[in-house]
Image: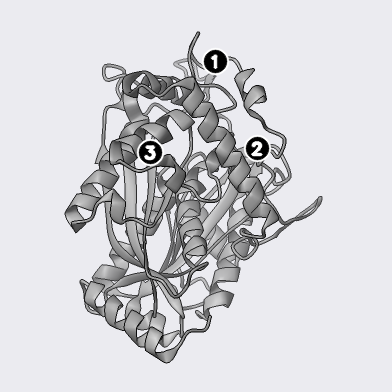
Amino acid sequence: MSETASGSETARAHLQVQETRPAERQPVIIAALRTPICRTNGTLKQLRAHELLAPLLTALLAETGVALSEPSDVVIGNAVGGGGNVARLAALEAGLPVTVPGLTVDRQCGSGLDAIVLASRLVAADGGVYLAGGVESTSTAPLRAHRNDDGDPTFFKRAQFAPHTLGDPDMGVAAENVAAEFGISRSRQDDFALRSHRRAVEAAAAGAFDREIVPLETPSGKVTADDGPRPRLSESLLARFPAAFVESGTVTAGNSCFDADGAAAVVITSLARARELGAPDALVVLGTETAGVEPRLLGIGAASAAARLLASRGETAADVDLVEFNEAFASQTLACLDQLGIDPLRANADGGALALGHAFGASGAVLVTRLLAQARRTPDREQLALAMISIAGGMGTAALFRYARL
């Protein structure tokens, strides 16, 4: 990317004003990539989680010039995988030496963003270079079962996230709870879902995703693009969907996300190391926050986290230039944006999970990948960027960044 010398010096001076730590401890994200995001049991169904993630790690190291042996750790979020340590497995699959460790994080839907948050805190503490992000292969997720007293299994679809005394609703029921609690109408939900698909279709056609997607080789051929956005979706078609979770409810399959396979990851390091590597720009990590809310209203968790984060930084929603929110359901997305005072038109400029899909453990990292890609469209302008995601069990995580030239 090119800019004038005076512009570069102005950006550098402003960045230095924004730094709250020495350059050796200021976390910055210098690269962010993702795989195509594809429907469960679709074109990526033959790849396990580590096989989705390994090509991303290889591509990130190649893009940034970080040596295979340099990462201090590989920190990866995963929600419904087979256990073990997918971060370590993927790192070795990618050809990193055995001396590079791996850590797998599980905060359900927030796992990918929380992995990046954790890595940023490690940089702030000790410096170093980290690969961080998330991955999910819902297509190959193992069957889960409780062992009965007689030793026979009883299979279940999801883990318990909260004590039953507090309420532990399924995700769709929780989305209905949020719609009712915050007055989110069916028409608003359908309108938002339709806009998400249209934005994603337009972005794909314009090549907006091309630079951030790492194609994947599968036994059936190369996969290069997302398969979720629906160009023929219409207002009339959305209106035909029945309530999916609660009788006479407003949450439908049309205004809910679909489960997906995919991965996203970043390179996060100190500002000092980023400059040594010759990184031209970065998302400077300004702050992060995780909050808890009532489990029956779990979809509102992101708003609580983001409100606390913005307040701690002395910022308001009006100060934020770029917003990425995980669209698990239109109802909870709209409720959170309303609570924060963010016009829904300002969020998810290229569509979100309603169109692209929700690869649980990866989705939070997808948000960060999208923010960096969007910020780079106007590289000579510093921008405040916010990523946020609501989490099963009644939680939310938010992260605030400033895009800047280095």
- What secondary structure is found at the residue carrying circle 3? strand
- Identified at 53% across, 56% down, the residue is 264
Residue count near mark 3 (Cα–Cα under 10 Å), binned few <14, some 14–19, many ≥20: many
Residue count near mark 1 (Cα–Cα under 10 Å), binned few <14, some 14–19, many ≥20: some
How far is disc 2 from disc 3 in space, using C-alphas? 21 Å
Residue 212 appears left or right of 303: right
- What secondary structure is found at the residue carrying circle 2? loop
Mark linked to residue 243: 1
- Identified at 70% across, 46% down, the residue is 44
130 or 383, which is in the foreground?
A: 383
The first of marks 3 and 1 along the sequence is: 1
Q: Residue furthest top?
A: 247
Residue count near mark 2 (Cα–Cα under 10 Å), binned few <14, some 14–19, many ≥20: many
Q: Amino acid at mark 2?
A: Thr
Colour mapping: one colour
Residue identified by numbered label 3:
390
The answer to whether residue 257 shows anywhere in this view is no
Q: Amino acid at mark 1?
A: Ala
Q: Residue furthest bottom?
A: 5
